[in-house]
Amino acid sequence: MSAQAVLFDAPGPKARRRHLILTIVGVVIVIGILAAVVYQLEARGQLTAEKWMPFLTVSAWRDYLARGLIGTAIAAALSVVLAGALGLLLGIGRLAHTRWIRWVSGVIVEFFRAVPVLIMMIFLFNALLVVRWFRNDVNPLMAVVVALTLYNGSVIAELVRSGVHALPKGQSEAGLSIGLTPSQTLRSIQLPQALVAMLPALIGQLVVVVKDSALGYQITYSELLTWSKTLGSAFANPAPAYIVAAGLFILINWSLTRLARAVEHRLRKRTVTAAPLTTAAPTIVQGGVEPGGPSNDLVEPYQPPPPRD
């Protein structure tokens, strides 16, 4: 019996009919909500051609949307690099053979995975204002980057741990059999394979980072959502500005998702092949001893005794 049959029973005619009815009802409800939203925006004059004209000008993109995209890109890039390093460190810590290292790493991972990112951003923003480590205009960026690093680093640590545990047990046994310590086996054999297998999931985590960077809007960080609000206030078209910002977020995240799928497809196509076969005869070491031993010029060949009279 296959795993699919065990985990999921194929629906019968009544179940398929019920699923179809529920799908149609759900689609009708969503369409009704969208129609109501569009009607209200149209009634308020937010969907007229005049409201969309600013997006055909260079100033709207150069002075507002481009700045927002740059702010989002800076926060996302810094967070991805730092979260990757932190996640790798915590993941190795959770796999360590020393109990207190595993315990400390586990507490850090579980804590920052449980705390909402927005709460961490607000807390860090206010804490940085009190300690005055950075300039006031840098505090929002630092709060966004640190919060995203702590949360996504904890998620990546779990990906590392689960990726190593998903490897065949023979990988670790092979490393130990050739004299490597458990730590050397983890670093040299298990971790590289786990990172390659987790690469699509790691790229997919970029989508979370880009989306969560919009939470910096709450602490006055100048990212895409903040500049879209400013654009809407400047041209009196907040609804079109937010729609365009949503479209840009969807385009960025869709591109990252496609990248993750392409990497996953490439990894699946890559196969490990054996060395090519050869018909050449093996090299034979000539001499009076075994191959690899001393040569004939060092060991005299065996001489039979002379015949007796």
Image (cartoon, rainbow, N blue to C red):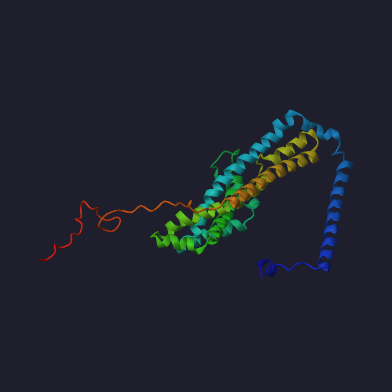
Please give left or right for residue 280 compared with residue 158 in the image.
left
Where is residue 50, by image quadrant? Answer: top right
Quadrant housing the C terminus: bottom left
Viewer-closest of 82 and 237: 82
Where is residue 250, by image quadrant? Answer: top right
Location of residue 149 with respect to 23 vertically, above or below: above
Q: Total of numbered circles in the picture?
A: 0
**Residue at the left extreme of this rendering:** 309
Percent across and percent down for residue 306 are: 13, 62
Q: Is residue 121 visible?
A: no
Percent across and percent down for residue 88 are: 52, 52
Viewer-closest of 287 and 235: 287
Quadrant housing the N terminus: bottom right
Please give left or right for residue 94 compared with residue 248 in the image.
left
- Picture residue at 65% right of the left edge, 51% below the top: 118
Please give left or right for residue 122 compared with residue 131 in the image.
right
Viewer-closest of 177 and 144: 177
- Picture residue at 80% right of the left edge, 37% below the top: 237
Percent across and percent down for residue 215 are: 67, 47
- Picture residue at 69% right of the left edge, 40% below the top: 224
Q: Is residue 176 visible?
A: yes
**Residue at the front extreme of this rendering:** 309
Percent across and percent down for residue 182 are: 43, 60
